[in-house]
Amino acid sequence: QVQLVESGGGLVQPGGSLRLSCAASGSILRVNGMGWYRQAPGKQREVVATITPGGSTNYVDSVKGRFTISRDNAKNTVVLQMNDLKPEDTAVYFCNFEVVFSAWRRSDVWGQGTQVTVSS
């Protein structure tokens, strides 16, 4: 059984910063792709940023230049540093890992979600 534990959400004023972290616990062989997604009220979940085991990153256009995703492969953790936050960044943020359990078993695992609210 694997769990992803998120931390770091909260309320921040426009222009402020937050740092989200997500760590995997449980018996896993390794983690392939890691990513952060978000879902605002009344909207579909969207990908925010992804990172490969080698460190290649991708971002949705709306956060480029403001958000940075990074990972620690040894600790199976991923971090999303969010700067210059805007009200439109308000959403529940979810981390997602492609977890490899063995040579023949892998699965997408989701965190429980953490609320980010950007408001004055």
Image (spheres, helix red, strand yellow):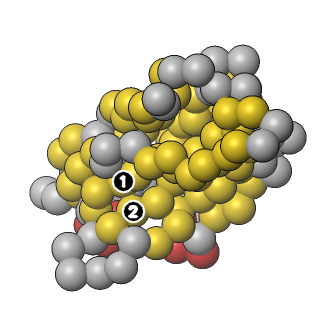
Q: Residues within 10 Å of mark 2 (few under 14, many from 20)?
A: many
Tell me where residue 50 appears, x and y as whole percent: 65, 55
Q: Is residue 69 visible?
A: no
Q: Residues within 10 Å of mark 1 (few under 14, many from 20)?
A: many
Tell me where residue 67 appears, x and y as whole percent: 55, 52
The amino acid type found where label 1 is placed reads Tyr
- Marks counted in the figure total 2
Is 27 placed above or below 86 here?
Answer: above
Tell me where residue 34 appears, x and y as whole percent: 63, 46
Q: Is residue 1 left or right of residue 72?
A: left
Residue at the extreme front of the image, as rendered = 104
**Occupied quadrant, residue 57:** bottom right
Is 90 placed above or below 30 here?
Answer: below
Asked if the residues shown at circle 2 and circle 1 are in contact, with their CB atoms under 8 angstroms apart, the answer is yes
**Residue 60 got which mark?**
none
Q: Residue at x 58, y 28 (%)?
A: 77
Instruction: Give the residue number, with chain letter if any, for mark 2.
Output: 38
Report the front residue among 84 and 25.
Answer: 25
Instruction: Give the residue number, with chain letter if any, for mark 1.
Output: 93
Q: Secondary structure at mark 1?
A: strand
Q: Is residue 74 left or right of residue 68?
A: right
The amino acid type found where label 2 is placed reads Arg
Q: Is residue 106 left or right of residue 87?
A: right
Q: Is residue 31 left or right of residue 46?
A: right
